[in-house]
Amino acid sequence: MDGFYFTFSYNVGVSDINYGGHVANSAVLNIFQDARIAFLASLGPYTELDLGGCGIIMPEAHVYFRQEMFLRDQLQVGVRCTKMKRSSFVLEYRVERAGELTVEGETPIVCFDYQKRKPCRIPIAFQKLLIDFTNV
């Protein structure tokens, strides 16, 4: 997957399928979340609730469907970081089945202090890892 240095394998299950017989819109966001959780864990002991001093929130999501996906499809999900700012960054996703693009998307991520209930700066150690890993 060109430009995506982290990939995550995902097998489409029955709970991902809608009445149209293909992967549901809502399931794609769950696939993105599973890949995001794995991406954060690959960088160190990081989770959506702890990037080394703060958690994250996702104020919006963008999904671009290119092909249908079906039950038992084996997918590869690429994740990369772009557009880093003081307290936010964007994660981009590329989903492929057998090397063919099925879905693309992005989620802006805002670092969030859950105790103070407000956005905060990206923790320095985590920011350095993102820069080193993704060349933002």
Image (cartoon, helix red, strand yellow):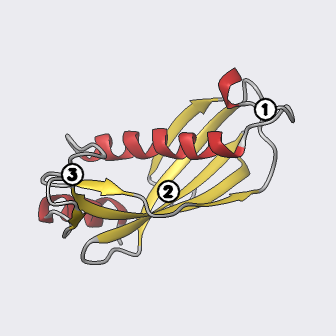
Q: Residues under labels 2 and 1: Cα distance?
A: 23 Å
Numbered circle sitting on residue 51: 3
- Tell me the SS state at disc 2: loop
Q: Find numbered disc 3 in the image and state the secondary structure of the residue it sits on.
A: loop
Kind of residue sitting beneath label 1: Phe
Instruction: Using residue 18 as the reference point, say whether residue 84 is left or right of it.
Output: left
Q: Earlier in the sequence, mark 3 or mark 1?
A: 3
Residue 44 falls in which quadrant of the image? top left
Q: Amino acid at mark 2?
A: Phe
Name which residue lies at 51% across and 63% down: 60
User: In the drawing, what numbered circle is on residue 70?
Assistant: 1
Sequence-earlier tag: 2 or 1:
2
Residue nearest the observer in this picture, 40 or 14: 14
Q: Name the residue: 27% across, 62% down.
A: 111
Residue indicated by mark 2: 4
Secondary structure type for disc 1:
loop
Q: Amino acid at mark 3?
A: Leu
Q: Position of residue 8 (x, y in %)?
A: 50, 39
Quarter where residue 69 is shown: top right
